[in-house]
Image: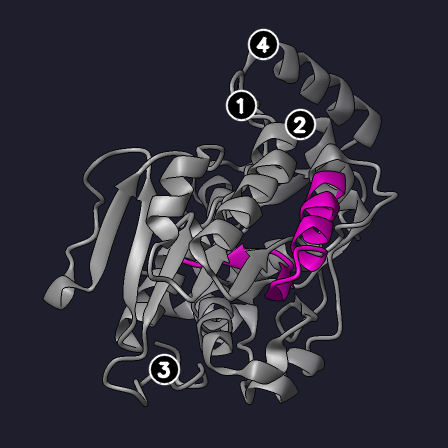
Amino acid sequence: MPDDAVDNRSEDPSPGKIAVLGSSGFIGAHLTLFLLQMGYRLSLLHHKADPDYVSPRGQIESVQGSINDKDALVRCFGGCTQVYHLVGIIAETRTKTFRKTVAEGTKAVIDAAKEAGVEKIFYLSALGASQDAQTDYFRTKWEAEQVVIESGLDYSIFRPSIAYGVRDKFINKIASMVKYSPVIPVLGDGEYRLQPVYVEELAAVMAHASRLDRTNGKIYEVGGPEQLTYLEILDIIKRVLGRKRLTAHVPISWAKIAAAVMEKILKPAPLTRDQIHMLKKESICDHTIVEKEFGVTFSRLEMQLQKYLRKR
């Protein structure tokens, strides 16, 4: 756990039972570990009957089902006072769409939570979610937020910028290109800004919210302490890895054409037009609000990358 992360030591020998949806995902896996360290008993929803987690002291129960399976959700939520809903997709597949997974899935979660007697929902949204967003991803995230807000249950919503860590699919993809390619493609001018937040610190904040009544009814935008352009992030990764690489700027119009072709052929596509738009739109916020609310100091990108990236 990072030195500046929220202190998650249990204050209660039996703090209760919490359900986590999306526990096998990048952020969900870290959140689950923090909640276990805090002493919670957990109920996890899995597509497979046996989860990958080793259950310490019988702390974990597993329910097989999907986000749209209300009966499975009700079973998963049995005896839980709080639910963390982290299920989402970044690109559509032949069977999983933003509409079905994000918007309709969240409605199923709320319906099941009410039936099971859950008191509070924690929803993982995205920085940029809005009613008039130009992407299906951001629009359905906003719609899911409205379902949570209008549910009548206590809630907290987290909107993170890019989360990074050992298994992330953004920083690590760039790092792989820096390691093995002499030329790095950059979409457009590369001057669009992001605010990378270390996944363990994001998960620690989300876990600690389970004990804070003052988080009820609040939407938190979460980002690291630096607003960095894509080119600045690339330079940091090159510096950490000790590589000198050329960059090739790819016009946005060309990238959108390539993405449109990939969307037709591949499900999920490795690059989509929505993702290009989201990248160009930027993902930044005032990080000091969450730091003050939770008493944390978020890490600078290069500091964390120095700890794990160059060792791999």
Mark 2 vs mark 4, CA separation in Å = 12 Å
Q: Which disc number belongs to residue 8?
A: 3
Q: Which disc number belongs to residue 268?
A: 1
Whether 145 is among the magenta residues is yes
Occupied quadrant, residue 294: bottom right
| Pointer 4 residue | 265
Mark 3 vs mark 2, CA separation in Å = 38 Å
Label 3 sits on a secondary structure element that is loop
Q: Mark 2: which amino acid?
A: Thr
Mark 2 vs mark 1, CA separation in Å = 9 Å
Q: Residue furthest top?
A: 265
Q: Which region shows up in magenta?
A: 139-165
Q: Mark 1: which amino acid?
A: Pro
Disc 3 or disc 2, which is closer to the eye?
3
Instruction: Assess whether mark 1 and mark 2 are in contact (beta carbons under 8 angstroms).
Output: yes
Disc 3 or disc 4, which is closer to the eye?
3
Whether 205 is among the magenta residues is no
Q: What crowding class fits label 3: few (fewer than 14 Cα within 10 Å), some (14-19), or many (20 or more)?
A: some
Label 1 sits on a secondary structure element that is loop
Q: Quadrant of the N terminus?
A: bottom left
